[in-house]
Image (tube, grey):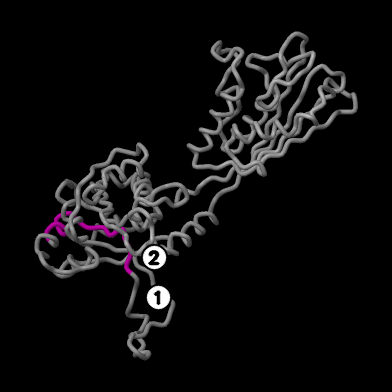
Amino acid sequence: MRVDALIVAAGQGRRSGCSLPKQFECLDGIALVARAYDAFARHRGVRNIVIVIGTGQNDLLNQAMQSRGPFAVVEGGTERQDSVRSGLSVIDADAVLIHDAARPLIPEAVITRLIAALLEHDGAVPVLGIADTLARSGDVLGDVVPRCDVVRVQTPQAFRIDAIKRAHAQSAGAAATDDAQLVRAMGGSIAHVVGDYRLEKITFPDDLERMTALIASQRIVRTGQGFDVHRLEAGLPLWLCGLQIPHDKGLAGHSDADVVLHAVVDALLGAIGAGDIGDHFPPSDAQWRGAASSRFVEHACDLVAAAGGQIDHVDVTIICEAPKIGPHKAAMRVRLTELLGIPHSSINIKATTTEQLGFTGRGEGIATQAIATVSTRTIL
């Protein structure tokens, strides 16, 4: 079955209290419409994706999608039904998943259940039961509505393409809050599949805050460890933590041999499972001869960001007899703050000696240990 996805992102979201139409607001650094796109793009059962936007929203969409693709863009209408109808006009598939961008978290399992249900039905919707007591409203509390007869209907909703196109063609002037009602109205069968609490719709100002907290609670925290050592030689500049330190010897290596930054890079790479510094900057590659190690740090930070992560904390221990690190720790901390782009309080620099034991104790070299804590997003 050829299945396409249709993301409806043409609304204004006036009730949300956002400065932008809510579909273009960010949730943990990713726009709502982009999160919906990512969920469909990851699913092996979804072929093409169409996004319906409002008039004049192309720039907002381009900014929100951040080079994601491919996808088709269609301009919607005044009402949601008009927007869906516009999107359906460009879809050539056996089935379609219609989804509101205001529901940014789409579990893969829900998509799979919806597609499977289309083998026997014209459409399928995800639903959740209701735990609260329901009663009719008015000036005083009205009659209780039996919960066993009521479910909460979510999106995405799946339809055989002929059924949903025919339903929209026959529904001119009819009011409906979702597409399943239109298919039911013409006699189509709509299956229920198990929905998910994460498919909540962002409508009011506190909804975005609540969903942000949900995502934060599901972030995965990983720790990486780095260790590096370089030999001290006379006549070389000494680079430590991106700073040139006054000393009669410097560290020897293929790059600038900044033992501190090398350990930090390995710690960052370890936290995201991206190998080690030698994998990315092999000593056999002439282009890195004498290179500033700050370039290695920038690359590692880019990899962390690409993995959907953020650097939470970096702790460094510099091991040497000379030079004395104490007078330079504050400046090192500032420099590492600049390179990593994280708060000053998220970086710690320590120094120790080996009591004149070993190669560091004899002044033959400098070693550094680093530990980096990185939190990464879940796929939601």
Residues in magenta?
153-166
Q: Position of residue 287 (x, y in %)?
A: 54, 13
363 left or right, relative to 225:
right
Disc 2: which residue: 204
Instruction: Please state which of the two labelled residues, at mark 2 or mark 1, is closer to the viewer.
Output: 2
* Helix, strand or loop at mark 1: loop
Image marks 2 and 1: residues in contact by CB distance under 8 Å: no
Q: Position of residue 285 (x, y in %)?
A: 55, 13
> Dot 2: within a 10 Å radius of its alpha carbon, few (fewer than 14), some, or many (20 or more) residues?
some
Counting the numbered discs, the total is 2
Quadrant of the rendered structure where residue 16 is? bottom left
Say whether disc 2 or disc 1 marks the residue closer to the N-terminus: 1
Circle 1: residue type: Ile
* Helix, strand or loop at mark 2: loop
Instruction: Looking at the picture, tell me which residue is in the foreground, 3 or 293.
Output: 293
| In the image, residue 205 above or below residue 9 | below
Residue 144 on the magenta segment = no
| In the image, residue 233 above or below residue 197 | above
- Calculate the distance from the C-alpha at mark 2 to the C-alpha at mark 1: 20 Å
Quadrant of the rendered structure where residue 148 is? bottom left
Residue at 50% in and 55% down: 215
Instruction: Looking at the picture, tell me which residue is in the foreground, 23 or 85.
Output: 23
Circle 2: residue type: Phe
Q: Position of residue 208 (x, y in %)?
A: 43, 59
Disc 1: which residue: 130
Residue furthest top in the image: 235
28 left or right, relative to 357:
left
